[in-house]
Amino acid sequence: MYRRLFRHFLVLSCVLPLMSFRMEQAGMPPENLLYDVRSAIVTAQADVSRQLVAETDRLVDQAIHATVRQVSLPRAILAVRIDRTAYVPLVIGGRHEARVRVEAIAVGNGEPIADGGFKVSAFALDRANGDEILAERIARRIAAEFRLREQGRTTLATALFP
């Protein structure tokens, strides 16, 4: 009796972890909305801080240059527009918000091939650091949407063990 129960338990404990593995299909086509991004242009209205625009441009360009594509994809340029920013003071620190529009433009003919927008917010204890944190969030979101490779900041661990 116990031997049969033990066998069932052993089979179940071996089968359950194997069920979590999933093999990808061999003939899977690449994603339709994946582009070979060549460069990015970040623009904003006059009331948006220059530091936010410059830092966002630097971080997105850094992610673009760090990305290497193994397959041939349609080439595109990103037009990033920071529409509106806001600062909401809190009891401790404050929340910085930005509304961003991103347009992918084909390199070959200059026509827009994708368009979208998103809203980003970041918390900062100091108002001076808010633009930098917000720029990192914007660049991280763009890198995630277009499958770009981010290069994070150098830390002691990455400096010692590359």
Image: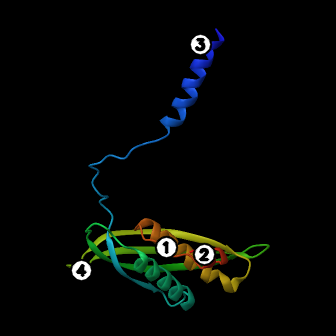
Q: Quadrant of residue 155?
A: bottom right
**Residue 72: percent from the left, percent from the top?**
25, 68
Dot 1 or dot 2: first in sequence order is 1
Dot 3 or dot 2: first in sequence order is 3
Q: Name the outermost residue toward the front.
A: 3
**Residue 74: percent from the left, percent from the top?**
25, 70
The residue that mark 2 highlights is: 158
Q: CA distance from mark 2 to mark 4?
A: 40 Å
Dot 3 or dot 1: first in sequence order is 3
- In the image, residue 145 sits, relative to residue 25, either above or below, namely below
Instruction: Judge from the rendering whether residue 70 lies leftward or rightward of residue 8; answer left or right.
Output: left
- In the image, residue 1 sits, relative to residue 161, either above or below, namely above
Secondary structure category for the residue under label 1: loop
- In the image, residue 78 sits, relative to residue 53, either above or below, namely above
In the rendered image, the quadrant that contains the C terminus is: bottom right
Instruction: Judge from the rendering whether residue 130 lies leftward or rightward of residue 57; answer left or right.
Output: right
Q: Nearer the viewer, mark 3 or mark 4?
A: 3
* Amino acid type of the residue tagged 4 in the rendering: Gly
Instruction: Judge from the rendering whether residue 64 lies leftward or rightward of residue 3; answer left or right.
Output: left
**Residue 102: percent from the left, percent from the top?**
40, 74
Q: Residues within 10 Å of mark 3 (few under 14, many from 20)?
A: few
The residue that mark 3 highlights is: 4
Q: Residues within 10 Å of mark 4 (few under 14, many from 20)?
A: few
* Amino acid type of the residue tagged 1 in the rendering: Glu
The residue that mark 4 highlights is: 110
Q: CA distance from mark 3 to mark 1?
A: 53 Å
Q: How many marks?
A: 4
Secondary structure category for the residue under label 4: loop
Q: CA distance from mark 1 to mark 2?
A: 14 Å
The residue that mark 1 highlights is: 150
